[in-house]
Amino acid sequence: MLIADIMIASVVTARPNDTVRRALGILEDLDIRHLPVIDDEGRVVGVVSDRDLREYWRSLDEPAAGAVDPLETPLAEVMSADVVTVDSQEEVSAAIDAMIEYRIGAVPVLDRSTGELVGIISYVDLLRLARDLLNEG
């Protein structure tokens, strides 16, 4: 089975200059945990997760008087920039291998011929697949 068969194709993205506040709003409103960050050419330059945002928040010291609101921090300062991706035409096992090896919960899916972001696959998608396969047997 190919990644394209089970990925989520309607991917919501953010930009590096978007704020932590905006990312939190998207994650909460859409009840998702991972948000690919793309540049002006549409290339994936990072991913921000709910875990990244929690770690960022915990890392803050007491803000100094007059300090900039931490929620206005650009995602470029918070996101994971070492992005692991998979190709939509790879076997699902490639996504599983990437998640296990890099200890991540979701992987952006690219069309390798164009470099375009075409989807995202998360551990939840893989668990749904496993459940469906078990129910068939």
Image: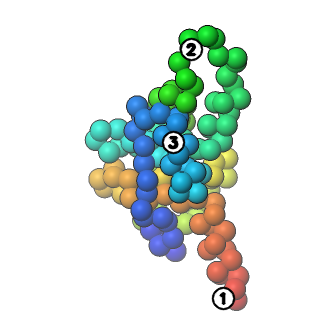
The answer to whether residue 40 is left or right of residue 2 is: left
Q: Which residue is mark 1?
A: 136
Q: Secondary structure at mark 2?
A: loop
Q: Which residue is mark 2?
A: 67
Q: Is residue 86 above or below residue 8?
A: above
Q: Residues within 10 Å of mark 3 (few under 14, many from 20)?
A: many
Amino acid tagged 2: Ala
Disc 3 vs disc 1: Cβ atoms closer than 8 Å? no
Q: Earlier in the sequence, mark 3 or mark 1?
A: 3
Q: Position of residue 52 (x, y in %)?
A: 62, 37
Amino acid tagged 1: Glu
Q: Is residue 77 above or below residue 114?
A: above
Name the residue at 55% across, 49% down: 27
Q: Earlier in the sequence, mark 2 or mark 3?
A: 3
Q: Decide if residue 51 is in sight here.
A: yes
For discs 3 and 1, the disc positioned in front in the rendered view: 3
Q: Which residue is mark 3?
A: 23
Amino acid tagged 3: Ala
Name the residue at 66% across, 68% down: 127
Q: Secondary structure at mark 3?
A: helix
